[in-house]
């Protein structure tokens, strides 16, 4: 598996695996976990503008740029 990189660097329409959440903010970690964004899950970047829209499992979530930047993903 390749090195991880921030979610905003992922190509729109591409799938990746969440490698890590790079923050010490427990509230943000809980918020992302509630949306299903946890280490090891598949994530699909659907769009970047006006916000980052991701699909995780059967759910969709909109993220602001600051939140998207703390999510690191990797591709096989």
Image (cartoon, helix red, strand yellow):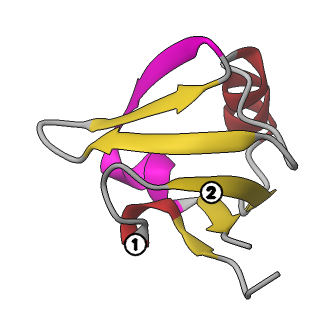
Q: Which residue lies at the image location 49% right of the left edge and 61% below the top edge? A: 7
Tell me the residue at 72%/63% (across/down): 22
Q: Residues within 10 Å of mark 1 (few under 14, many from 20)?
A: few
- 2 or 1: mark nearer the eye: 2
Q: Looking at the picture, how far across and down is residue 55, in whole percent?
A: 51, 28
Task: Determine the residue positioned at 33% across, 38% down.
Answer: 46
Residue at the disc numbered 2: 16
Between marks 2 and 1, how big is the CA–CA gap? 11 Å
* 17 to the left or right of 56: right
Q: Position of residue 56 (x, y in %)?
A: 62, 27
Mark 2 in CB contact with mark 1 (< 8 angstroms): no
Give how far across and how far down residue 52 sits, in percent: 32, 41
Q: Position of residue 12 (x, y in %)?
A: 30, 54
Crowdedness near tag 2: few (<14), some (14–19) or many (≥20) residues, C-alpha within 10 Å:
many
Which quarter of the figure has residue 25? Answer: top right
Specify start and end residues of the magenta stretch as a single range: 58-69
Pointer 2 or 1: first along the chain? 1
**Label tally:** 2
Q: Nearer the viewer, residue 69 or 19?
A: 19
């Amino acid at each position: 598996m390749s090195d991880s990189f921030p979610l905003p660097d992922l190509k729109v329409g591409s799938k990746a695996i969440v490698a890590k959440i790079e923050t010490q903010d427990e509230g943000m970690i809980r918020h992302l976990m509630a949306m299903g964004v946890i280490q090891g899950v598949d994530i699909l970047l659907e769009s970047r503008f006006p916000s980052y829209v991701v699909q995780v499992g059967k759910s969709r979530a909109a993220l602001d740029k600051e939140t998207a930047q703390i999510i690191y993903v990797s591709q096989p």
